[in-house]
């Protein structure tokens, strides 16, 4: 399979983390797409994903699967052992709800802030901006961080008692906040502690370099 | 189970259609929530669903599941026979992708148009509006209709060769367009033909009255 993505992006991070958690790296070939050059808005790329977003998974049969949740569903079902999207109806419902909530209330809100109230990907890509809407979404994201802080004060993971797609989505949101130097509110200590724990997971820590073999150690003379 | 919803709403329609398709009506008790009165924005309701949206499914154990996709995942997994969200990895991926795309490109765009560029639910509920953003989203929805028209020119259903959650999401979008008298572009004939077929499904046709037993026939004197 091919993953069309960019190593740094917060949405690609969601799928890279899922790939690592599921030990699927040997099956994946990475195809870089430059957001800064607007390669995700070219007609060629839009034919792969109408919405013009990264990442996109290309299956061996030529099928393109876009949208992080959809790609995660695909990858998690591959081995018949879903660990990221839930096994029971209740787990599936809670994980999908909390993942969507992390998108709506934090990740996608930060994305709108980035594209509308900051220079975003630059004038060639950001051809329409609505700064008022962008700042409203930044404020929504900060409220959302308080909401998730409350959740993480009482449970170890976002949706249930194990690591899931919902944690990955919220990690993506906080990676985006990091990239924009949007600090977590200092009173969100449970959220910060959870994020510190998540950053220790190899899937999160090694996500950017996962497409490359580790660099050979320098020869000492 | 209890479904907190309103019979007319396009998002509640998505879950009502799923309930009917899965023959789960006998398990559901409907709890009406008035959008016009802003009952979905009260602290009591926000404790059930932080995002303040309908519908919300309340399980017997007191768990609340919000977000249409999450509720549909829950309901579809209940009998171990998923028909709406896919069985194989590829089906799951495609259905989740196309359902999300129908949200992003049409349904949610129409919702933003409604809440920001029309009187929406009235001044007591719509305390902040951004009309420029609202009209942008209306135009995005119209472009999205052309995209799905192209899809439906070559296949009978939105995601794959059977009726799925992705069809339900696009039906919800066109229900919303109907409510707002936002006409389908006349050149979208495949989309219109598909919508006409979908409206013949009992799950779609009877969704508004499904919480009530059929009225007794009038006595003829």
Image (spheres, coloured by chain):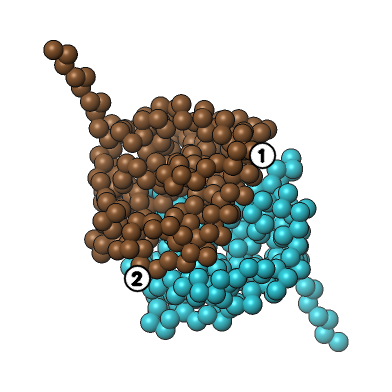
Chain colours: A brown, B cyan
* Residue shown at 52% from the left, 28% from the top: A197
> In the image, is residue B161 above or below residue A184?
below
Along the horizontal axis of the image, is A108 left or right of A63?
A: right
Q: Nearer the viewer, residue B159 or A17?
A: A17
- Mark number, residue B150: 2
> In the image, is residue B190 above or below residue A206?
below
* Residue shown at 56% from the left, 71% from the top: B130
Report in which chain the residue with disc 2 lies: B
The residue carrying mark 1 is A150
Along the horizontal axis of the image, is A215 left or right of B118?
A: left
* Residue shown at 52% from the left, 72% from the top: B134
Q: Nearer the viewer, residue B145 or A17?
A: A17
What secondary structure is marked by label 2? Answer: helix
Report in which chain the residue with disc 1 lies: A
Q: Find residue A190 and report its horizontal and vertical position in percent.
A: 62, 33
Q: Find residue A66 and report its horizontal and vertical position in percent.
A: 37, 52
* Residue shown at 52% from the left, 65% from the top: A132
Q: Is residue A187 visible?
A: yes
Q: Quadrant of the C terminus of chain A?
A: top left
Q: Find residue A57 and report its horizontal and vertical position in percent.
A: 32, 47
> In the image, is residue B71 above or below residue A170?
below
Q: Is residue B144 visible?
A: no
Give the crowd class for mark 1: few <14, some 14-19, many >=20 residues within 10 Å: some
How far apart are labels 1 and 2 at the CA level?
A: 45 Å
Give the crowd class for mark 2: few <14, some 14-19, many >=20 residues within 10 Å: some
* Res. B14 image quadrant: bottom right
* Res. B52 image quadrant: bottom right
- Mark number, residue A218: none
What secondary structure is marked by label 1? Answer: helix
Along the horizontal axis of the image, is A124 left or right of B21?
A: left
């Amino acid at each position: 399979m091919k993953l069309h993505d960019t190593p740094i992006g917060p949405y690609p991070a969601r799928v890279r983390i899922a790939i690592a958690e599921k030990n699927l790296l040997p099956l994946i070939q990475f195809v870089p797409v430059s957001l800064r050059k607007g390669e995700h808005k070219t007609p060629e790329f839009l034919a792969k994903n109408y919405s013009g977003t990264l990442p996109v998974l290309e299956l061996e049969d030529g099928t393109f699967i876009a949208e992080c949740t959809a790609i995660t569903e695909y990858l998690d079902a591959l081995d018949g052992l879903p660990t990221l999207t839930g096994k029971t109806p209740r787990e599936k419902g809670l994980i999908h709800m909390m993942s969507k909530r992390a998108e709506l209330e934090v990740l996608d809100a930060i994305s709108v802030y980035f594209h509308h109230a900051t220079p975003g990907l630059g004038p060639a890509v950001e051809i329409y901006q609505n700064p008022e809407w962008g700042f409203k979404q930044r404020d929504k994201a900060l409220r959302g961080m308080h909401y998730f802080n409350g959740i993480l004060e009482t449970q170890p993971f976002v949706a249930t008692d194990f690591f899931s797609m919902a944690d990955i989505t919220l990690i993506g949101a906080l990676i985006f906040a990091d990239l924009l130097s949007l600090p977590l509110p200092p009173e969100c200590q449970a959220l910060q502690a959870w994020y510190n724990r998540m950053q220790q997971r190899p899937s999160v820590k090694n996500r950017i370099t996962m497409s490359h073999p580790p660099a050979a150690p320098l020869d000492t003379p």
